Image (spheres, helix red, strand yellow):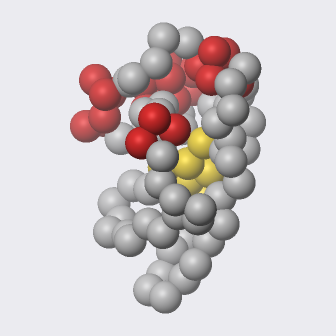
Amino acid sequence: MLVFPDLRDLRRYEQHPLEPGLFIYIPPGTGHRGLDVFVNVLTIPGFKPHNEYYLDRDIRDAAGGAAPFNENLIGAKNYERIEDLLLTDL
C-alpha cells in the first residue's frame, strides 16, 4: 500500500506492506494506491463514487517516475487540477 499524505507533494510517499487479515484506516484526503495487491475495500460510512480520483498521471509527472504509480491508470485521470481537489471536501 502506498500512501501520499500530502497531495501537494506527490513525490513524498510511504510504503506499507499488506498481509491477509489486515485492516487499515486511510483518512479522508489522503492519496493512496495499491499496486500488485488483491484487496477487499470496506468503506465506512459508505463508498462515494464521485470521491475517487485517479492520481497516477500526476504521481508520475510530479515525481518524474521516482514514486510508484500504476501505468494502467495513466489515462484514467478524472479531474483537471489536483489543486482543485484540495479546495473541495475529499
Residue 51 drawn at (x, y percent): 51, 38
Residue at 69% across / 32% down in the picture? 89
> Would residue 24 appear left or right of 58 to someone viewing this image?
right
Q: Is residue 80 visible?
A: yes
Q: Quadrant of residue 7?
A: top right
Q: Is 66 above or below relative to 4?
A: above
> Would residue 74 appear left or right of 60 to someone viewing this image?
left
Residue at 44% across / 86% down in the picture? 20
Q: Is residue 4 visible?
A: no
Residue at 72% across / 44% down in the picture? 5
- Furthest toward the bottom, the residue is 21
> Would residue 29 appear left or right of 55 to someone viewing this image?
right
From the image, which quarter does the C terminus lie in?
top right
Q: Is 28 above or below relative to 45?
A: above
Q: Is 28 above or below relative to 65?
A: below
- Furthest toward the front, the residue is 45
Residue at 44% across / 66% down in the picture? 41
Q: Nearer the viewer, residue 13 or 65?
A: 13
Q: Is 1 above or below relative to 61?
A: below
Q: Nearer the viewer, residue 87 or 2?
A: 87
